[in-house]
Image (spheres, rainbow, N blue to C red):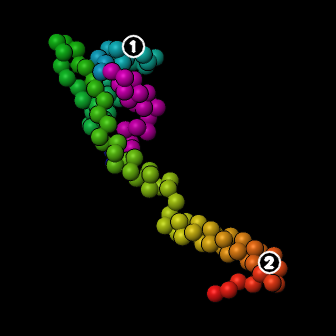
């Protein structure tokens, strides 16, 4: 997960991943969309490949890169755990609901006429 997080920390690499989301692209096609040198793009592609986020295949003399999303699953799961309410938050939400329900019942009971006493 750390290697994946490190790989997507760079904005150029995130942009490459977004580009590959739609279709596989050659290294030249990817490099052509950036104002940085081709060797710099190659280094970014190597980082993504080593993190398992892209796969490259030979197509003649070209390298074609394809997005691989499976390594993002662990990171996405961790982010979900970070952003969802903790166990305590669920308990506190339930307690708040119960307090409001009890107050509403007391107001309703206090508003009844004495001749309308509850029978149990």
- Considering the whole magenta stretch, tell me its main secondary structure: helix
User: Is the C-beta separation of discs 2 and 1 under 8 Å?
Assistant: no
Q: CA distance from mark 2 to mark 1?
A: 77 Å
Q: Which residue is mark 2?
A: 112
**Residue at 68% across / 70% down in the picture?**
100
Residue at 31% x, 24% y: name it: 42
- Residue on which the image places disc 1: 32
- Give the image location of residue 65, x and y in percent: 27, 24
Relative to residue 58, is residue 78 drawn left or right?
Answer: right
What is the quadrant of residue 26 in the picture?
A: top left
Crowd around label 1: few <14 · some 14–19 · many ≥20 (10 Å): few
Which residue is painted at 82% across and 84% down in the image?
114
Q: Find the magenta span and give its range.
A: 5-23
**Mark 1, secondary structure of its residue:** loop
Q: In the displayed structure, would residue 13 be above or below residue 39? A: below
Q: Residue furthest bottom?
A: 120
């Amino acid at each position: 997960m750390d290697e994946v997080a490190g790989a997507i920390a760079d904005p150029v690499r995130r942009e490459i991943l977004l580009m590959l989301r739609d279709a596989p692209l050659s290294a030249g096609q990817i490099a052509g969309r950036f104002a940085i040198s081709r060797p710099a793009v190659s280094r970014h592609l190597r980082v993504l490949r080593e993190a398992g986020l892209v796969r490259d295949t030979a197509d003649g003399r070209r390298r074609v890169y394809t997005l691989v999303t499976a390594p993002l699953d662990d990171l996405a799961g961790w982010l979900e755990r970070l952003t969802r309410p903790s166990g305590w938050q669920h308990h506190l939400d339930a307690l708040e609901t119960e307090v409001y329900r009890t107050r509403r019942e007391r107001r309703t009971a206090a508003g009844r006429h004495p001749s309308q006493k509850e029978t149990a």
